[in-house]
Image: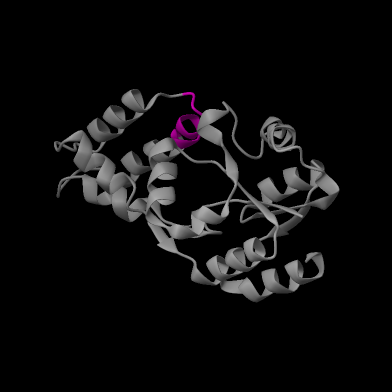
Amino acid sequence: MDFLFDIGNVIVGVDFIPALSRLAPSGTQDIDSRLDQIIDRKDEFEAGLIAPDVYFPWAANLLNFAGSHEEFLTTWVDIFTPNTPMWKSIEKLHAAGHRLILFSNINNPHKDYLIKKYPVFQYFTGGIFSYQTGHIKPEPAIYQLATQQYHLTPETTAYIDDLPANINAGKEAGFICHEYRTDRHRDFLDWVEPLL
């Protein structure tokens, strides 16, 4: 069976705000508004519609960040926490011979950082990453792309995501869907067991 896995708040926890807040010098005015602007444009960036060499300098300037590009990127990727219960489930699914595919709204620095840092990603055969496609979930086009690229049969493809809108689009695409919550991992285990 094929399994499509979202990354953020499924495989790893994600929290942008603490990391981005550290980039702003002490005393920066309207920090919440500045952070909101960066987050508001993140979908465009993660869809590949804004180049990194445009988005990152814009965000750094907005935060009054005066450090180097390398320092900015080091903080930019420092937003993840392991979800070890899901990691154990992923390892078991892989060991049982299921094909695991990543399916994420993500930018290239985050994707590269995660794959390098966390061994759990070795269990995946590949992925559909929004920044490479020009689309983000829940746009139907990215679901169609996943189906075509990996020759998925929707009726035998399980899809795990934490966002209701993405899950609804997955259902429209014909996938077997589970809306994941980290505080209810047991619900995931109960859902996945009959599929194995």
Q: Is residue 138 found left or right of 55 in the rendered image? A: right
Near-viewer residue (104 or 119): 119
Q: Is residue 1 found left or right of 180 in the rendered image? A: right
The correct choice, above or below, for 96 with respect to 17 in the image is: below
Give percent across and percent down for residue 103: 61, 44
Give percent across and percent down for residue 47: 52, 30
The correct choice, above or below, for 113 with respect to 66 in the image is: below
Which quadrant is the N terminus positioned in? bottom right
Residue 126 location, quadrant: top right
The residue shown at (38%, 47%) is 113
Give percent across and percent down for residue 196: 78, 66
The residue shown at (31%, 55%) is 18
In the image, residue 159 lies in the stretch drawn in magenta: no
Give percent across and percent down for residue 76: 32, 45
Question: Which span of residues is magenta-colored?
Answer: 41-49
The residue shown at (69%, 65%) is 96
The correct choice, above or below, for 137 with respect to 22 in the image is: above
Q: Is residue 75 found left or right of 117 in the rendered image? A: left
The residue shown at (74%, 67%) is 192
